[in-house]
Amino acid sequence: MYALLRPLLFALPPERAHHTAMALLKGLAAVPPLRWMLQRTFSAQSPDLERRYMGLTFPNPVGLAAGFDKDGRHLEALACLGFGFLEVGTVTPRPQPGNPHPRLFRLSADRALINRMGFNNDGAQALAQRLRRWREQAHAGPRPVIGANIGKNKDTPNEQAADDYLECFHTLAPWADYFAVNVSSPNTPGLRDLQSREPLLHLLESLQNANQRLPAPRPLLLKIAPDMDARQLDEIADIARYTQLAGLIATNTTLVRSGLRTNAQRLEAIGPGGLSGAPLRQRATEVIRHLRHRLGPEALLIGVGGIDSPQAAQEKFQAGADLVQVYTGLIYEGPGLVRDILTRGI
């Protein structure tokens, strides 16, 4: 079915195609018989697929990466596709429009995307209201775990970044199962500077101090960039251990453009942005393998980057990932990718 639908979606600009596809899915999921059909078609439910990490029970180890449903508008529809967990965001304290259009581009020859979305979102308060309604809805069967990916507003100086992350954390803590701290997007100026030792320590310690004051602390994870060398990865792992993070998400998009089939003129015309999809597959796997070796078996690792097949998912698990997330692979392969991984890639 997706093989017929994809050419129609790919005839649209990428961002419009995304909104069109999500509106269609949401419409189908709103009709009980069609929702049942979606669940039957795309879900693979089995006790053998369940995973328990961070005190949470994941119905299965395949999740949706942040950025796909930034504002939590489509949780019910996405739950029909068989995900074990859904990560919403990246969300900022205040709403912001993100970068100017166009800001999302397909590299079909490379099965990749370039985006410079810029944390466009409705703000933490709006997301909290949607997550609250989601929690209050009656729902049959296992529900996916919900993660909240948090960031800072574009106009917030890095010296005050911790205040933005703390505001998001406090606003969403009643409704999110875990938090992903995003300091690795390449599309907010200066954000990756927060991956440096001192600002990162300050940010994570501030969040953990607030977290430990909750009646039930939430697991905190850090989402990192793939564009770091071994020394930088070791430092990140040591900081994660020192601040007692639950784990790491590896990786975000890359700034590297080497080895692409897409010609240089096309890449120059697109301009800056983070690259995701198949070209990131090998590097993301290398980062996971390095981090697992450095951290040992205890820390949770979520693998993301270039997962577009059961084989690609297997690579991440074999490298040391406990859970995996998909995004760009879903664009190219369609919603059947989740069931394929669960039935042939675990």
Image: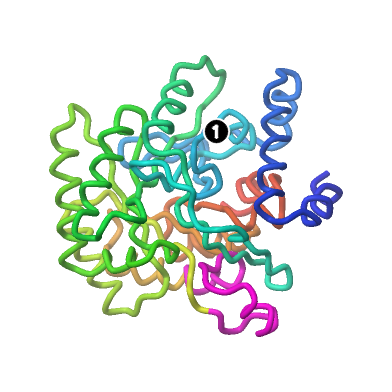
Q: Residue 233: x, y in percent?
A: 30, 72
Left or right of 264, for residue 148 = left
Q: Quadrant of the N terminus?
A: top right
Residue 263 included in the magenta stretch of the image: yes
Work out whether 163 lies above or below 103.
above
Residue 24 included in the magenta stretch of the image: no
Q: In which quarter of the image is residue 83?
A: top right
Q: Residue 207: x, y in percent?
A: 20, 46
Nearer-the-camera pick, 209 or 43: 209
Residue that numbered label 1 is attached to: 73
Left or right of 95, for residue 256 = right
Q: Residue 115: x, y in percent?
A: 56, 62
Nearer-the-camera pick, 105 or 189: 189
Colour mode of the rendering: rainbow
Work out whether 38 lies above or below 330.
above
Question: Which residue is pictured at 62% across the width and 80% down the height?
Answer: 268
**Other residues around mark 1 within 10 Å, as few (<14) / some (14–19) / many (≥20):** some
Please state the extent of the stretch shown in magenta in the rendering: 257-284
